[in-house]
Image: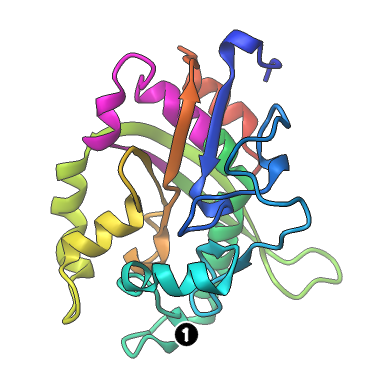
């Protein structure tokens, strides 16, 4: 991908890499390396939720303050009483999570162009950027004991938020919260967040959905060939 010019730069704060409660982040998060008012001291260590390993927090106080919201979606798959997943399924799930984390900057960048938020920021509140991937399992290499997986993008689309809720709310409903609340909290933890969802539909729903809620602070980016750029940029 060509380097960004100053007029074609997106400054984002990926919620997966900043404090879930106060939205502060490390200074080297910015592509331009320019500090902002929300930058933490450079020696700050962002720590994940010990239970689900998903959100980050800069302090214990922030983690406690965010718990009333986070508890709706926080659970360990290994402790799920309904778990019936084989070791092979769990291996594929872990590979899927690693692929999503490794490629989330490329996916987020494509989503900004796909949703055309430069001209219609209101779309952040009504649509979800969805990336569907295909996964291929390969036998262990020489000397290894576990298989490897390659991932390719099958398609990427913008879908109305109401359609996503209609598809997944019932599945995530529980005695403690409605399915709508769980899906919404996972997709977007605060107003103005771009909702991004990566799907491996070869996995059970509880394992094959990866959300990337991202707060867009300033942007002027639009790439008409965003899908081709995304496919060429991601690693397998």
Q: Residue at position x 56%, y 64% from top?
A: 57
- Is residue 123 in the magenta section? yes
Give percent across and percent down for residue 232.
Answer: 62, 27
Looking at the picture, how far across and down is residue 28, in whole percent? 73, 41
Range of residues picked out in magenta: 108-132
Q: Secondary structure at mark 1?
A: helix
Looking at the picture, how far across and down is residue 165, in whole percent? 18, 52
Give above or below for 224 relative to 13. above
The image quarter in which residue 75 lies: bottom left
Residue 96 lies, in percent from the top left, at 54, 58
Q: Residue at x 41, y 70 (%)?
A: 65
Q: Which residue corresponds to mark 1?
A: 78
Left or right: 144 in relation to 91: right
Q: Which corner quadrant holds the N terminus?
A: top right
Q: Quadrant of residue 125?
A: top left
Quarter containing the C terminus: top right
């Amino acid at each position: 991908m060509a380097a960004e010019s100053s007029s074609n730069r997106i400054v984002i704060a990926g919620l997966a890499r900043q404090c879930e409660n106060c939205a502060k982040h490390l200074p080297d998060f910015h592509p331009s390396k320019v500090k902002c008012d929300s930058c933490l001291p450079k020696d700050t260590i962002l720590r994940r939720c010990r239970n689900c390993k998903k959100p980050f927090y800069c302090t214990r106080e922030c983690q406690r303050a965010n718990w009333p919201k986070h508890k709706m979606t926080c659970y360990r798959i290994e402790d799920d009483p309904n778990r019936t997943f084989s070791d092979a399924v769990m291996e594929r799930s872990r590979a899927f999570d690693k692929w999503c984390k490794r490629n989330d900057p490329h996916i987020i960048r494509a989503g900004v162009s796909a949703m055309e938020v430069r001209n219609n920021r209101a779309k952040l509140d009504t649509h979800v950027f969805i990336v569907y991937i295909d996964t291929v399992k390969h036998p262990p290499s020489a000397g290894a004991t576990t298989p490897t997986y390659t991932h390719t993008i099958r398609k990427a689309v913008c879908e109305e938020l109401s359609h996503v809720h209609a598809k997944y709310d019932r599945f995530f409903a529980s005695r403690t919260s409605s399915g709508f609340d769980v899906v919404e909290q996972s997709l977007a933890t605060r107003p103005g967040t771009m909702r991004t969802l990566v799907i491996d539909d070869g996995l059970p729903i509880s394992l094959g959905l990866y959300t990337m809620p991202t707060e867009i602070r300033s942007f002027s980016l639009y790439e008409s060939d965003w899908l081709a750029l995304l496919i060429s940029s991601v690693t397998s």
